[in-house]
Each structure stands twice: as C-alpha cells, then as structure tokens.
Image (tube, rainbow, N blue to C red):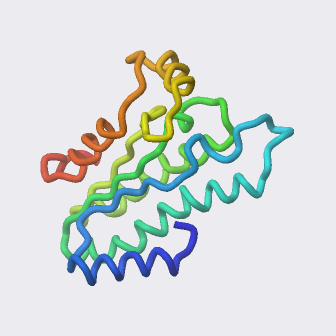
Amino acid sequence: TTSWESVTRLVEATLAELGRIDILVNNAATPGGMVRGTLAEADETALLDDINTKVVGYMRCAKAVAPHMQQRGWGRIINIGGLSGRRSGVISGLRNAAVVHLTKTLADQLGPNGITVNLVHPGTTRTERTDAQTESRAAQGNAIRRIVDAQEIAQVVAFLASTKAAAVT
C-alpha cells in the first residue's frame, strides 16, 4: 500500500482477472503499530512508515478502485482500524484515529454513487501468530473477556460487503 504504482498494478491485475472490482478491504498495518514506547523513545521515521502504510495506503487503494465502483454505481470499501484509535496507550494509535476520519470522509463522498464505506475496529485478534500471554492479556482488557478470532472479524466484513448492508455506511 506504500506505492501508488504497486496499488495500480494490483487494481489492473484484479480487473484483468475478474473484470470488475466490487469490494475493497483495506487491512494493511503492523499489528499494534511500529511506535509503542514512550514519547522519548518514539521514532518519527517509524511513525511516518506506519501512517504511509495504513492511512495513506488505505487512501491510495480507495482512490484506485473508486472510479470503477462509481462507474457501476455500486461498491463496498471496508477499512480495518484498531481499538488504539479510540483509546490512548501507543503513539501509533493515531493512525487508527486518522482512518476513522478517512472512512467518514469517503462514506460522505462516495455514498451518492452507491458505495458504502465502513470501518471495523477489532481489538486484539487471534491469528496463527498469537501467543498465550498476548491472548490472556487481551482477554482481560475487553468487554467480552475473550480474544476475538479472525473468523469473527471476517464475518463482520462479509456482512458489510453484502447487499444486506446497503444502508450501513
């Protein structure tokens, strides 16, 4: 997502293979962000890389697919954010707050063209790389007292990508 050329090649390859683009799921980032320490330890280059990957990268991808969706009068853009956008703790969390703003702006701009834009803010999610200590710590810090599974996030994304979510943006 950090290169316009790479994003446009992806879109061109998708169009060549599938003939159209209906759904974009933006989900690029280093889990937890690259800048997790104190302000004194914060590396501004790492923060800029975080923002370029997630915020600007999501914008690049949306910009590349939007004309194709607008032409058809239908589309779904689903951004994956993170809970650090709604609470303090890590400096890299500001990228998730920026994704909130980007999502709302795109929803307002693209909605009249039949394109919904939504944001999913999963907390720590169990993947093949999640260790027991991370899982235990994450489960204690959320309302449902358990870590969510990637499959559960996928179900939410599948709903938002469906025709059933036509009025959800």
Residue ID at (30%, 76%): 14
In the drawing, does residue 66 fall left or right of residue 29? left
Going by the picture, which residue comes out furthest to the left?
A: 164
Residue ID at (29%, 48%): 169
Residue 102 in percent (x, y) is at: 47, 54
Residue 121 in percent (x, y) is at: 43, 38
Residue 16 in percent (x, y) is at: 27, 84
Residue 81 in percent (x, y) is at: 47, 45
In the drawing, does residue 157 fall left or right of residue 98? left
In the drawing, does residue 35 fall left or right of residue 76? right
Query: Which quadrant of the view contains residue 105?
Result: bottom left
Count of numbered tags: 0
Going by the picture, which residue comes out furthest to the right?
A: 40
Query: Which quadrant of the view contains residue 54?
Result: bottom right
Q: Is residue 5 above or below residue 91?
A: below
Q: In front here: 107 or 156? A: 156
In the drawing, does residue 134 fall left or right of residue 62? right
Q: In front here: 117 or 47? A: 47
Q: Is residue 16 above or below residue 120?
A: below
Residue ID at (29%, 46%): 157
Query: Which quadrant of the view contains residue 120?
Result: top left
Residue ID at (35%, 72%): 65
